[in-house]
Amino acid sequence: MPEPGSSPERKRRLVVLAGPTAVGKGTVAADIRAHHPEVWISVSATTREPRPGEQNGVHYWFVSTEEFDRMVADGELLEWAVVHGRNRYGTPRQPVDLALASGQPALLEIDLQGARQVRETMPEALFVFLEPPSWEELVRRLVGRGTEGEAERERRLATAREELAAQAEFDVSIVNREVHAAAEELVALMELDAGTAAP
Amino acid sequence: MPEPGSSPERKRRLVVLAGPTAVGKGTVAADIRAHHPEVWISVSATTREPRPGEQNGVHYWFVSTEEFDRMVADGELLEWAVVHGRNRYGTPRQPVDLALASGQPALLEIDLQGARQVRETMPEALFVFLEPPSWEELVRRLVGRGTEGEAERERRLATAREELAAQAEFDVSIVNREVHAAAEELVALMELDAGTAAP
C-alpha cells in the first residue's frame, strides 16, 4: 500500500514474476503484453531454438552459446540459469537499467534460480510467485505418469519439492486460476508498487 | 547486391539511417515500426522531455542527465550527441549487440554526429542518408525566415552546409519524397543487405 504522503514520483521498482516449471508464467506475460503495452517486459536471451510463433526480439533474443557465454563473462546479464541441464536463459542488464531509470513499469518473467540471483543484486525488487491452482496436479505433471525410470522420477520429485518450498522466499503470491485474471492482478500490483518507491 | 554464391546465413549488418535536421527520419522510422514489426528499431536514450504521444521505452528512453552521463562514462552507449547544444541523445549498446547476434534486422535512426561515431566503431554497418526532395526548401527551413539575428542565421547556414556535405560519407541515399515509399525502400535495402553478410 502506498504510504500516506508518499510522493507521486516516477520511481519504480523492478517486478519479478517467477514460479514452478509449467505453472504458466509465459502465458501470463503474453497476456500482459497483449493488454498492457505500457508495461515493459524484459526480453530474455536464450540459447534454445525458437518455437513456432516465437519472434526474435519480442519473446526472446535467440543467440548462440558462444554469444551467451561472452555476455556472462562480460557481466552483461542480470541473472542467468541453465534450464533442464541444457539451455541457457538470461536477462540482459542494460534494458532493465533503462526501464528503471526512465520510470517505466518493468517486469521480469524468469525461473526460480534467476529470481534468487536478482534478489542478491536487487533486493529492492518486488518478487511475485505464480502459484498453481492445485499443487497436487502440478506435482503429478512434473513427476510424470510413471513411464520414466525410478531415478528420473526421484529427480523430478526433488525439483517439485524445491519449487514448492521456494514460495516462502517471495513477497507476494498470485494463484494462476485463470490467465487473464492473474495477469490483471499482477499489473494492479505493479501500479500499486509505483506509489511505494523505496526512500 | 548479394554476391553470387553468398550464403543465406542469418548474419545481418547494422543499418544506420541518418540525414539532415528536419528531413523526416523519425517519421520514416515510425512508418517502418507500423508496417514492419520484423524490423527491430533501436530505442535511443534522451534527456529531453517526452512530447505528447511519445511512449517511454517505445520511442525513447527518457532518462535524467545524471543517468545519461553515467551511461557515457560506463561505455554503455554506441554513440551519443548533444543536439541543439542542449539535449543529449544516445544509442544503448546492449540491445544493438543482441539484435545483431541473434540475426535480427536492426535499424538505428540517429543524427549525423552519431552516424560518424558508429562508423568509427562499426565500419561494416550500412549507412543510409535520408535526402530531402529539395535541398533549397530544407535550407530555407533550417536557416529560418529572417526573423532571427544575423549571427543565428549564420550559425544555421553553417549547420545546413555541413549537413549537405555529409551525404558523401554515406553508402546509399534515399530521397524522402513520400514517407511510406522511403520506408519501404529502406526495408528493401535491409532485406537485400541480409544476403551480403561480410565474410
Image: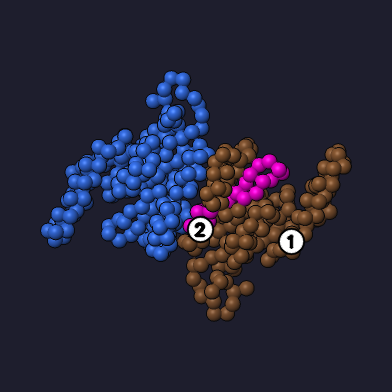
Chain colours: A blue, B brown
Residue B115 placement: quadrant: bottom right
Residue that appears at 68% across and 66% down: B171
Residue assigned mark 2: B97
Res A136 visible: yes
List the single residue furthest toward the bottom.
B5
* Magenta span includes B77: no
Lower sequence index among marks 1 and 2: 2
In the image, taking residue B187 as reference, residue A66 lies left or right, namely left
Task: Give percent across and percent down for residue A66.
Answer: 41, 64
Instruction: Name the kind of residue labelled 2 in the image.
Output: Asp
The C terminus of chain B - image quarter: bottom right
Tag 1 secondary structure? helix
Do the residues bearing badges 1 and 2 touch, measured as CB atoms within 8 Å? no
Q: Secondary structure at mark 2?
A: helix
Q: Provide the residue span drawn in magenta.
A: B80-99
Work out how far the residue at label 1 is from the one at label 2, CA to CA, in angstroms: 26 Å
